[in-house]
Image (cartoon, rainbow, N blue to C red):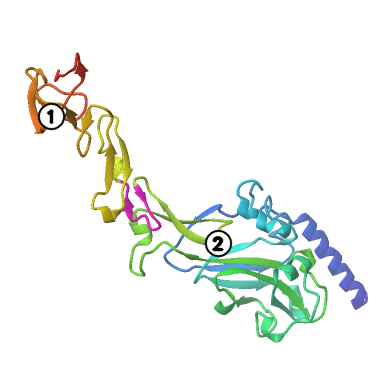
Amino acid sequence: MTMKSAFCILVCFLQLCTVNGQVICERQIITEWRTEPKPAIIKWTPRENVCSDFYTECWNLNKSVTGEVLEEQNLSIPQICPLQLQLGDSLFISSEPSFQSYGMNLVNVSKEEFINCPKAAFLQEQLIFVCQIRGLHQVDPNWLGVGTHYFAELHRRGPLLCSMGLRLNVTVKQQFCQQSLDAPLCSGHGKCLSHVWEKAYHCHCFSQYSGTFCQKFDVCSTKPCHNNASCAEKSELSGDSYECTCPPKFSGKNCTEIIGQCQPSTCVNGNCINVTPNTFLCECNKGFTGRKHLFSLSYNNNFICY
């Protein structure tokens, strides 16, 4: 068997493996920021982990899940399962042993070159590794800045396998979950999360908290306003953190005061206390309760404790 015929058989074999080796990439739709960096290893081979459709295979997503994903609709091409890293993570490439004789390297390409596969000559500055890949190689952190990076295989000789899936889309994300470097993530009141289609990690706050860093406590969630009053948060500069809008017949900071003045037997089973010249509340006797707080239901215009 001649060298040329052996080469043709190898190419046909790899093509067959690529067609039958497409997979649904196993990826989490939502990831939480890790406090420690982590290494990632990519097996550089068309025999496995090659997906074709950016949504249903590469990310296992429904195309309608988010409008932002639509930006990547033209990446529905054969490629190694896309990778998402945190800023600071390390990336290792494990090459196919049979590639070593061809002098394989990776090259940093544009999005257009990634889609169409590189055809032009490349500058030395675009090569990911200083020499051809043999075994396991770490990608220099300089190639893993924040943003999306596109890598494709480059052989000095032998088959060009980019169109068969040997290209990698790597997104490196930073987090915006700390008010300062020594502050806890999301002020300790939320989780620092990112969806696969997002470009960074952001805070998702627990109930009762809000703000970019979950630093604001939602006082209205404690229901400080009584008697079906509505609650609204106010700016911290105003001095008060919330404001109650009282329904008719009620007044006061928390709408606990009744508009009017104490009259004989107003509270029935309790003491009537004038708060202002035009408001009062009922302080119920032991064993009796009112409608809300210290006062009670209205009956024949009397606010009684029962």
Q: Which residues are magenta?
A: 209-218
Q: Residue at x 6, y 18 (%)?
A: 264
Q: Nearer the viewer, residue 97 or 197?
A: 197
Residue 280 is tagged as: 1
Q: Give the secondary structure at mark 1.
A: strand
Mark 1–mark 2 Cα distance, whole angstroms, equals: 56 Å
Q: Main secondary structure of the magenta part?
A: loop
Q: Is residue 54 above or below residue 10?
A: above
Q: Is 190 positioned to the left or the right of 38 in the image?
A: left
Q: Position of residue 22 (x, y in %)?
A: 73, 55
Residue 72 picture quarter: bottom right
Residue reaching furthest to the front = 277
Q: Amino acid at mark 1?
A: Phe
- Image quarter where the C terminus lies is top left
Q: Amino acid at mark 2?
A: Lys
- Which is closer to the viewer, label 1 or label 2? 1
Residue 199 is tagged as: 2
Q: Is 171 positioned to the left or the right of 202 in the image?
A: right
